[in-house]
C-alpha cells in the first residue's frame, strides 16, 4: 500500500512499491489519460508530470514517487491554472485548444504525451524556437505522422500564453500609471 498525490489529491493505492505508475493510474484509479504504448519509455504516450517534469509512467515504480506531485492529463488544466496564476481552472489549456484547432490529433495514441510534454515546455519556455520544440518533443511518437501540425500547434499555444501573460501584466499596471 502506498500514498500518492495525483492531481492534487492524496490517494492510498493497493499496488506494491515496484508496480509501474501506469498500472496504478489505469487499472486501480481508472484514469484514461496516460496510455500503454510501448512499455519501454520510448513513445511518450504514458507521460505524466512529476513535480512539473515529464515522466514516463510505464517504467516508473510507485516507490519512487512518494512525496511527489503527479499530474495526469485529467489534471493538466488545474496544473496549468496553478502555474500561471489563473483565478479559475479552464476546461482546456492553450496546448489542448491549439492541438485541436490545428487538427494535429488524429488517432489519439500520442495526444496524452504530446499535451504533457508541450505543457512542460511552454511553462518553462513560453517562446520556444522550432528547434527547441523539436528537441523537447523528441521521443514522443505520433503514429499518424502529424509532427508539422503538432509543432504548429505548440507555436500557436505559445502565442496564446504570451498574449494572456501580457494582458495580465497590462491589467496589473492599470491604476499604477
Image (cartoon, grey):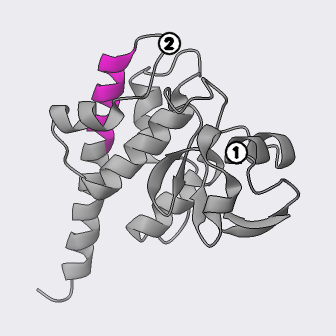
Quarter-wise, where is residue 69 in the image?
A: bottom right
Separation (CA) of disc 1 from disc 2: 24 Å
Q: Position of residue 44 (x, y in %)?
A: 50, 32
SS at mark 1 in the image: loop
State the residue at coordinates (85%, 47%): 28
Instruction: Say whether disc 1 or disc 2 marks the residue closer to the N-terminus.
Output: 1
The single residue placed furthest to the front in the displayed view is: 18
What segment is highlighted magenta in the picture?
146-157
State the residue at coordinates (29%, 27%): 151
To which residue does mark 2 refer?
143
Membership of 160 in magenta stretch: no
Quarter-wise, where is residue 95 in the image?
A: top left
- Determine crowd level at label 2: few under 14, some 14-19, many 20+ residues with C-alpha closer than 10 A: few
32 relative position to 48: left or right:
right
Q: Nearer the viewer, residue 79 or 170?
A: 79
* Residue 90 visible to an observer of this rendering: no
To which residue does mark 1 refer?
20
Amino acid at each position: 500500500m502506498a500514498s500518492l498525490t495525483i492531481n492534487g489529491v492524496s490517494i492510498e493505492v493497493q499496488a506494491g512499491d515496484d508496480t509501474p505508475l501506469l498500472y496504478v493510474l489505469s487499472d486501480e484509479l481508472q484514469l484514461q489519460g496516460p496510455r500503454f504504448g510501448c512499455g519501454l519509455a520510448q513513445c511518450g504516450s504514458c507521460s505524466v508530470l512529476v513535480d512539473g517534469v515529464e515522466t514516463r509512467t510505464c517504467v516508473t515504480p510507485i516507490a519512487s514517487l512518494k512525496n511527489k506531485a503527479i499530474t495526469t492529463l485529467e489534471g493538466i488544466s488545474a496544473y496549468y491554472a496553478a502555474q500561471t496564476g489563473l483565478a479559475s481552472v479552464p476546461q482546456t489549456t492553450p496546448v489542448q485548444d491549439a492541438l485541436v484547432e490545428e487538427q494535429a490529433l488524429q488517432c489519439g495514441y500520442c495526444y496524452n504525451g504530446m499535451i504533457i510534454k508541450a505543457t512542460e515546455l511552454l511553462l518553462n519556455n513560453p517562446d520556444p524556437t522550432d528547434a527547441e520544440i523539436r528537441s523537447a518533443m523528441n521521443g514522443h511518437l505520433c503514429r499518424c505522422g502529424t509532427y508539422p501540425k503538432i509543432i504548429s500547434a505548440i507555436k500557436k499555444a505559445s502565442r496564446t500564453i504570451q498574449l494572456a501573460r501580457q494582458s495580465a501584466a497590462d491589467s496589473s499596471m492599470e491604476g499604477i500609471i
